[in-house]
Amino acid sequence: MTATAPRTDTRTMTMIAAINNALDLALEQDDTVHIFGEDVGVMGGVFRATDGLQAKYGIDRVFDTPLAEAAIVGMGIGMGLAGLKPVAEIQFAGFLYPALDQVLSHLGRYRHRTRSRYHLPMVVRAPYGGGVHTPEQHADSPEAILAHTPGIKVVIPSTPADAKGLLLSAIHDPDPVFFFEAIKLYRSVKETVPTGDYRIPLGKARIVTDGDDVTVICYGGMVEVAQKAAAAAQSAGIGVEVIDLRTLVPLDTDTILASVKKTGRVVVVTEAPRTGGFHSEISATIAEEAIEYLRAPIVRVTGFDAPYPPFTAIEDVYRPNAVRVARAIKAVMGY
């Protein structure tokens, strides 16, 4: 997939506005695109990602579903096989678990099952992650479960422009894509975003800051955390290269390995639990492909092996912050 040239027209948007803009454009350009999920129609979504779209495109194109995640994904599978482009919303990523049978047993398998005679173009959007003191199961980070499922792509943007460009690419991708959106970033970040058809290819990471001493690898809500830690390290004379993966599957190993070979020191930052997280996959890839370049052990900064804490200020201890990342940078520099 190649990136389309963005139009010169731009507008300052939050991430939630950029997502709404992408969905609006997709509905306008392609009448096979349908959006559905819990409260996405009349209400416009709990975060207003689909605000105004049902009124504009009608109840047949944008519609509410029962509170039944397995039914949402299962219906999307049928729609995709019938030639439509379903865009389903799971209201929070932590609500996904009832649908895992549909995901693991069916969604990712159709290309393989039919020897590529059938593709399944479906996008599943879901808010994920912490930072806003949500209730239980509203801040989970289940991306590793999806990344471990063959046939499924996993996309996690960190900026409004990336959210729009990656979402449009995901909608027009022939395979199923899970699109996780960091709740913390929905309205806390604004930037100029192209207003026209604008796509970013899946599988291409973004170098956020250049540096020669340490590579910090992150995605989604952890990118702004890594940037703060990198700024603090820079003031101490340490050059930090922050890599925003953008997509976990496919993974841009070329960008990762090129940076590791330059710096020789690596910190991987995610807010998911430590054991079995995607951070471990990144670390293993580096160990297999570039261990001779490492000057220090890889350090992971993650959540903990416990359910995400609801509501309370304990969240500020669970969720990685710039101080924890800065300590990890100091550790690899001092090895």
Image (spheres, helix red, strand yellow):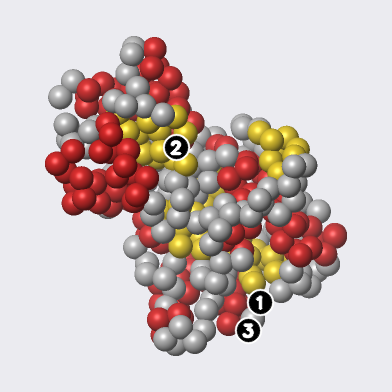
**Mark sitting earlier along the chain (2/3):** 3
Mark 2 or mark 1: which is in front?
Answer: 2
Residue drawn at point x = 35 percent, y = 22 percent: 239
Residue that label 2 marks? 207
Relative to 224, residue 160 above or below = below
SS assignment at label 3 = loop
* Quarter-of-image position of residue 274: top left
What's the distance in space between the residues labelled 2 and 3, CA to CA?
A: 39 Å
Residue 91 placement, left or right of 204:
right
Contact (CB < 8 A) between labels 3 and 1?
A: yes
Q: What residue type is labelled 1?
A: Leu
The amino acid type found where label 3 is placed reads Ala
List the single residue furthest toward the top. 236
Q: Which label is found at residue 82?
A: 3
Determine if residue 3 is in view.
yes
Q: Which amino acid does label 2 sit on?
A: Ile
Count neighbours of disc 1 (C-alpha within 10 A) and say few if under 14, some if 14 to 19, many if 20 or more: some
Q: Quick one: SS at disc 1?
A: loop
* Distance of label 3 from label 1 (alpha carbons): 6 Å
Judge by depth and name the residue closer to the eye, 119 or 139: 119
Q: Where is residue 121 in the image (x, y as percent from the top left)?
A: 57, 72
Q: Which of 250 and 322 is in front in this view?
A: 250
Q: Which mark is residue 84?
A: 1
Quarter-wise, where is residue 132 in the image?
top right
Q: Of the residues tagged 2 and 3, which is closer to the observer?
A: 2
| Few, some or many residues within 10 Å of mark 3 (<14, 14–19, 20+) | few
Which quadrant of the figure contains the C terminus?
top left
